[in-house]
Amino acid sequence: MNDTQTAERSEAFAHLKFARVGPRKLRRVADAIRGKSVREALVLLQFSGVFASEEVEKLLRSAVANAENNHHMSTNELYIAKITVDGGPGGGITKRLDPRAQGRAAFKRKRMSHMTIVVTTAAPKIKPKRRSGASIALSTKSTRRAAVESAKPAKRPRKKAAAKAGASK
């Protein structure tokens, strides 16, 4: 036996090809879970309202199953080491016609994506950068209340009350 066969692997992969979701939509979800523990990421994906999170959740579960069954890793201590989203064939395969003015037609390009997830037992040493579009988490009650309070306009004194105060002088 080789040394490579006897040594335990510390990472497991899962690939998804030709997903019928645009890469930009998947990258938003991928950026949100990059570097997190698998448990935390699964909770985020399960309760987020983003359509693309379903595809990412399935792929993450597949990577965890690969780690457990093929590489004998403990599923309790897994982290997402790497997640990449690449564009698939962008409209070369699935084109749809969109009617335009004066009898013309334009093509709608239905984009596809390829995605890869790598899970590992070691926690990431460097925290991934926060990306601007990477918000899929549901907000808590306190943050929603704070947002509502900040959105309300400041109260102005009523004209009648101000007129009465000026007349009583």
Image (tube, rainbow, N blue to C red):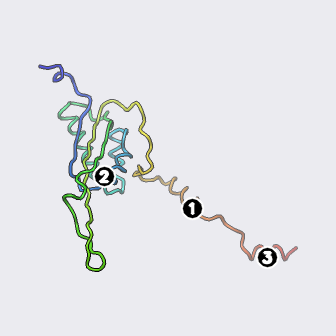
Q: Quadrant of residue 103?
A: bottom left
Question: Residue at left 41%, top 49%?
Answer: 134
For label 1, the residue is 151
Question: Residue at left 20%, top 61%?
Answer: 94
Q: Quadrant of residue 68?
A: top left
Q: Residues within 10 Å of mark 3 (few under 14, many from 20)?
A: few
State whether residue 135 is above or below residue 1.
below
Label 3 is placed on what type of residue? Ala
For label 3, the residue is 163
Q: Earlier in the sequence, mark 1 or mark 3?
A: 1
Between circles 2 and 3, the one closer to the viewer is: 2
Q: Residues within 10 Å of mark 2 (few under 14, many from 20)?
A: many
Q: Earlier in the sequence, mark 1 or mark 2?
A: 2
Q: Position of residue 151 (x, y in %)?
A: 57, 62
Q: How many marks?
A: 3
Q: Position of residue 25 (x, y in %)?
A: 33, 54
Q: Nearer the viewer, residue 114 or 158?
A: 114
Image quadrant where one finds the N terminus: top left
Quote the CA–CA distance across marks 1 and 3.
29 Å
Q: Nearer the viewer, residue 99 or 159?
A: 99
For label 2, the residue is 23
Label 2 is placed on what type of residue? Pro
Q: Nearer the viewer, residue 51 or 22?
A: 22
Q: Position of residue 21 (x, y in %)?
A: 27, 56
